[in-house]
Image (cartoon, rainbow, N blue to C red):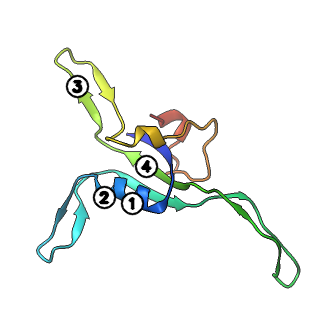
Amino acid sequence: MKISKYEFDSQEQAETKIAALPHAKDEEGNDYPTHKHTIVKLGFITLEKGEYDEEGEETKAPVLSDKYSVDVLWKDLEEVDEDGNVTINHPYGWSGKALDLEDEGVHGFFGVLYQDNKM
């Protein structure tokens, strides 16, 4: 299992990449994922907190990222070649959006550390 953090230019771009992951349709025509990855859509994360007065009125607006953030806990991406060498790669189109953070970021997967498991 590996963890990656991504920034997309828009929510639509992120949704397109997520929709391209393996899925199937049920009897009623509804899509459902057939992959084992865990995807968390963080959205436009807060870069600077807003400020509020005693009545809860905003005195300074928060600053949000202009990128749409997604965290993924990837499962079963390992590929083994004929010599037994194992490689782990991002699915098509994801690597160019991957981040390489020096900390754990704003989100975690239930105690699974990003730094110990990043791609």
Name the residue type under label 4.
Val
Question: Which numbered disc covers residue 72?
Answer: 4
Secondary element under disc 1, as helix, strand or loop, is helix
Crowding around mark 4 (Cα neighbors within 10 Å: few <14, some 14 to 19, many 20+) is some
Q: CA distance from mark 3 to mark 4?
A: 22 Å
The residue pinned by badge 2 equals 19
The residue pinned by badge 3 equals 80
Up/down of 64 relative to 80, above or below:
below
Question: Which numbered disc covers residue 41?
Answer: none
Label 3 with label 4: CB-CB less than 8 Å = no
Residue occupying image coordinates x 48% and y 51%: 71
- Which of pointers 2 and 3 indicates the residue nearer the eye? 2
Report the front residue among 25 and 38: 25
Q: CA distance from mark 2 to mark 3?
A: 26 Å
Q: CA distance from mark 1 to mark 3?
A: 29 Å
Label 2 with label 1: CB-CB less than 8 Å = yes
Secondary element under disc 3, as helix, strand or loop, is strand
* Residue 72 locus on image (x, y percent): 43, 49
Residue occupying image coordinates x 28% and y 40%: 76
Residue occupying image coordinates x 53% and y 54%: 69
* Residue 95 locus on image (x, y percent): 42, 38
* Rendering quarter of residue 49: bottom right
